[in-house]
């Protein structure tokens, strides 16, 4: 069962963010029982060829590749899907037009240009034959909007009413910055904002994700609040946390630990 089908059936889905192009990672994900892998091309130096290779390998293991593009550009979204992505996330969306174009790129490709714009605005109706073709051509594609700013929250109802949108990805870091409380993820105002986004999204029948890199308990807390796309940590964060813990344990066991040289557990920036 694909990720989109699971979400429509009311199931939670689980994944992680990763940046390594090493071919062994998808097997690790499969053994962990992940449904999807989040490939972030906004904050990493991955090129189009690397992204496509990662998507193809991930799909071969039965895991859904979800790619975040570096800017809200429908042509970049189409490139990702052409490369093997099954879902696309566009960052920092604040207008209905941006979400409409993302939906067109993920659900109506290869339709483009003036005809696409007329269809998206409801000025032209597709024939039954063309609709069936596009539905099949884009079957299983997932359209996700990054909501991570106060302006987006202020027009959330309109943004989430765009046809074709499947879900929302809360960017906690950027949202905290926009709120004026940088990286204060337990601040009452941050939690109030997240709850508002979650409840509004779920009331629209859409799915929602939020990404954190440390405590599993934080993820569980937001799942209980309504999150159903769990994006837990990143390859770099998980490696860093485990390496720090293991090296600390070894140094302590052999007596090499002195005050000031015990590695601290630091939060890898969430996106």
Image (cartoon, helix red, strand yellow):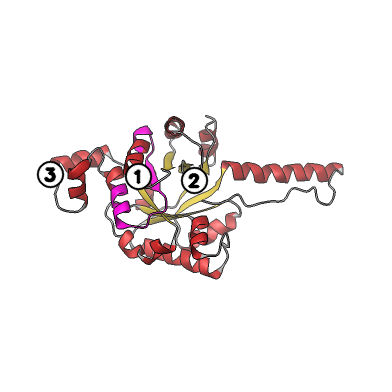
Instruction: Report which residue position mark 2 lands on.
Output: 15
* In the image, residue 94 lies in the stretch drawn in magenta: yes
SS at badge 3? loop
Q: Callout 2 environment at 10 Å: few (<14), some (14 to 19), or many (20+)? A: many
Residue at coordinates 58% horizontally, 63% vertically from top-left?
Answer: 184
Q: Which residues are magenta?
A: 81-103
Gap in angstroms between the C-alphas marked 1 and 2:
24 Å
* Residue 196 location (% of width, % of height): 43, 67
Gap in angstroms between the C-alphas marked 3 and 1:
27 Å
* In the image, residue 176 lies in the stretch drawn in magenta: no
Residue at coordinates 24% horizontally, 42% vertically from top-left?
Answer: 135
Query: Is 102 or 2 nearer to us in this picture?
Result: 102
Look at discs 1 and 2 and give the one toward the viewer: 1
Query: Is 51 or 75 nearer to us in this picture?
Result: 75
**Observer able to see residue 72:** yes
* Residue 118 location (% of width, % of height): 17, 49
Gap in angstroms between the C-alphas marked 2 and 3:
37 Å
Left or right: residue 96 compared with residue 147:
left
The quarter of the image holding the N terminus is top left
Extreme-right residue of the structure? 255
Look at discs 2 and 3 and give the one toward the viewer: 3
* Residue 102 location (% of width, % of height): 32, 48
Q: Is residue 181 above or below residue 269?
A: below
Q: Callout 3 environment at 10 Å: few (<14), some (14 to 19), or many (20+)? A: few
Instruction: Report which residue position mark 1 lands on.
Output: 73
């Amino acid at each position: 069962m694909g990720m989109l089908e699971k979400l429509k059936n009311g199931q939670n889905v689980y994944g992680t963010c990763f940046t390594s192009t090493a071919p062994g990672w998808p097997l690790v994900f499969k053994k962990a029982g992940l449904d999807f892998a989040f490939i972030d091309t906004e904050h990493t130096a991955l090129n189009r060829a690397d992204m496509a290779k990662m998507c193809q390998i991930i799909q071969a293991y039965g895991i859904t590749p979800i790619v975040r593009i570096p800017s809200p550009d429908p042509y970049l979204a189409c490139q990702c899907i052409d490369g093997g992505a099954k879902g696309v996330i566009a960052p920092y969306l604040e207008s209905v037009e941006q979400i409409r174009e993302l939906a067109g790129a993920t659900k109506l490709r290869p339709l483009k240009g003036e005809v696409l714009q007329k269809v998206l605005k409801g000025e032209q109706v597709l024939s039954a034959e063309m609709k069936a073709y596009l539905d099949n051509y884009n079957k299983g594609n997932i359209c996700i909007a990054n909501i991570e700013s106060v302006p987006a929250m202020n027009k959330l109802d309109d943004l989430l009413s765009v046809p074709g949108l499947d879900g929302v990805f809360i960017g906690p870091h950027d949202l905290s910055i926009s709120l004026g409380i940088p990286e204060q993820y337990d601040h009452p105002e941050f939690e109030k904002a997240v709850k508002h986004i979650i409840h509004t999204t779920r009331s629209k029948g859409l799915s929602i994700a939020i990404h954190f890199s440390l405590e599993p308990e934080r993820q569980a807390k937001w799942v209980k609040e309504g999150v159903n796309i769990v994006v837990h940590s990143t390859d770099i964060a998980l490696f860093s946390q485990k390496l720090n813990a293991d090296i600390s344990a070894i140094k302590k066991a052999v007596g090499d630990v002195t005050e000031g040289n015990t590695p601290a557990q630091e939060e890898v920036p969430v996106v």
